[in-house]
Image (cartoon, helix red, strand yellow):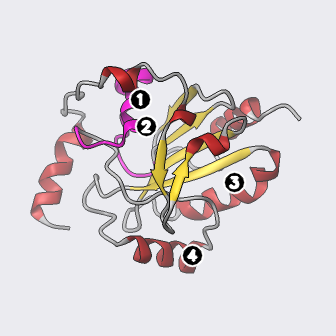
Amino acid sequence: MTIKHLLRSIPLVLGLVSTQPIPPAVAAMNSAFEFDFKALKGGDLPLKQYEGKAMLVVNVASKCGFTPQYAGLEKLWQQYRDKGLIVLGVPSNDFGGQEPGTSSEIQQFCERNYSVDFPMTEKVAVTGSEAHPLYKWLEAKLGDDGRPRWNFYKYLIAPDGHVVGGFSSKVTPDDPKLISAIDANLPAH
């Protein structure tokens, strides 16, 4: 980790970064399924394809103390995907420079170390003025609680596209509070 990355992350950890103005067009969107990403493996990744399913959006990083949560996220994906849950990994280098890799390096790391099979986006910013529009929307919907504080911050999206809530990095994928929220928001079969 470079000094630059360390200094950049200190205000975020302490919660001293003021929220960025949310573009009115982003704030006016009604559904998380209105946003698009690029896929880690290449190509477009429109979230509209997941409409009607619950979605757990997680900003991830390969060199973080929370990185072992990849195993729990994969287990969650395997257990719940046939019940209507999408786990979406969003690599980000915003916190401590802990995701320095290229798309290929990130993909290889996740597959080799955690057998990750759930969908992942290309690496994007999740905080500040350069944050992906979905993360700006989450902040608009949840206020200051909508801004991730570190890697592996989780957001649960309901099948209709509204944000159910955010879960801190310390909430593991098998935490009863998270599992209960997922169970309560799975699509009706």
Query: Which residues make up the magenta segment?
Result: 129-152
Residue type marked 1: Trp
Dot 1 falls on a residue whose secondary structure is helix
Say which label, 2 or 4, has the lower sequence index.
4
**Residue at point 52% right, 72% down?**
110
Q: Nearer the viewer, mark 1 or mark 3?
A: 1
Label 3, label 4: how far apart the Cα atoms are = 16 Å
| Residue on which disc 2 sits | 134
Q: Which mark is residue 165?
A: none
Asked whether 140 or 44 is in front, the reply is 44
Residue 12 is left or right of residue 189, and the answer is left
Q: Which residue is mark 4?
A: 111
Q: Crowding at label 4, few (<14), some or many (≥20) Cα neighbours within 10 Å? A: few
For the residues labelled 4 and 1, say whether their Cβ atoms are less than 8 Å apart. Answer: no
The residue located at (57%, 75%) in the rendering is: 111
User: What's the CA distance linking mark 4 and mark 1?
Assistant: 30 Å
Q: Label 1: which residue? A: 137
Residue, far right = 189
Q: Return the residue at label 3.
A: 76
Q: Residue 43's spot in the image, x, y percent? A: 50, 62
- Position of residue 27 in the picture relative to residue 83 (left or right): left
Is 17 placed above or below 100 here?
A: above
Q: Nearer the viewer, mark 4 or mark 1?
A: 1
Helix, strand or loop status at disc 4: helix
Say which element carries label 2: helix
Does the segment drawn in magenta span residue 135?
yes
